[in-house]
Image (tube, rainbow, N blue to C red):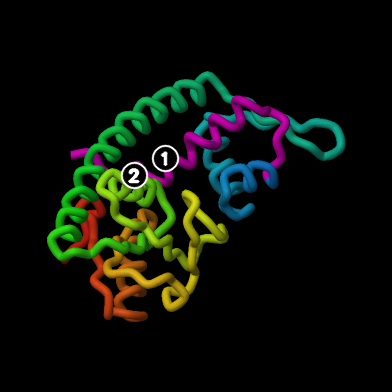
Amino acid sequence: MNAVPDPEETLTLEILDTVQRNEQLSQRHLSRHLGVALGLANSYLKRCVRKGWIKVQQAPANRYLYYLTPTGFAEKSRLTAEYLSTSLGFYREAGNSCTRLLDQCAANKWQRLLLCGVSDLAEIATLRAMEREFTIVGFYDPACERLTFLGKPVWRDLQNADPHEARILTEIASPQTRRTGIVQADASVPLLVPDVLRLKP
């Protein structure tokens, strides 16, 4: 089975792709574009330079130009192929996993669902739920700065969420930590975990 796309390789691919499209970018611009802290963007950029995938050239006014090297182009092609393969496999596996959970919800007559984690998995779960006429009341994600996602509210505090009958864990980056936090905060509502996340019961 295909695994969840590797976050580190995905970020590296985004950096190589961004550099290829815009050689005159700043580290601050890269940080904003990737949605990560400046220090993390800088760290990954330096790693790409060390690996020989990106070449840096100083420009006037203390600016830098970043170029993809031939090795960088080859690595970008490899990562792109791997990402697409993994992503398609992940989409199929995640979709089937969400369908099994929705069958469980239907058997228990749970119609109003809260998705815990703003992610690609949350998008897949939302699509599958819409096909089955479930109601997604919104999303719980204490790390998300957005107020809405897919047209639904995002709550940082679980207690503020609209009434719901079941929760589905859709956090990809750190699912075990998020599951533990939810259970400790409020275990009164069932929390269902898609098997695609491969967490221990």
Depth check, front residue: 178 or 151: 151
Evaluate whether residue 81 shows in this view: yes
Real-space CA distance between mark 2 and mark 1, rounded to the nearest whole angstrom = 26 Å
Q: Is residue 156 found inside the magenta-colored segment of the image? A: no
In the image, 32: left or right of 3?
A: right
Q: Which residue is mark 1?
A: 9
Quadrant of the frame with the C terminus: bottom left
Q: Residue furthest top?
A: 70
Tell me which residue sits at (49%, 61%) in the image. 153
Tell me which residue sits at (56%, 60%) in the image. 147
Tell me which residue sits at (58%, 41%) in the image. 45
In the image, 63: left or right of 180?
A: right
- Dot 1: few (<14), some (14–19), or many (≥20) neighbours within 10 Å? some
Q: Residue furthest left?
A: 107
In the image, what residue type sits under mark 2? Leu
Evaluate whether residue 46 shows in this view: no
Q: Nearer the viewer, mark 2 or mark 1?
A: 2
Q: Which residue is mark 2?
A: 127
First along the sequence among labels 2 and 1: 1
Q: Find residue 54 and report its image quarter.
A: top right
In the image, what residue type sits under mark 1? Glu
Q: Residue furthest right?
A: 61
Quadrant of the frame with the N terminus: top left
Tell me which residue sits at (29%, 50%) in the image. 133
- Dot 2: few (<14), some (14–19), or many (≥20) neighbours within 10 Å? few
Q: Which residues are magenta?
A: 1-27
Q: Is residue 157 above or below residue 65?
A: below
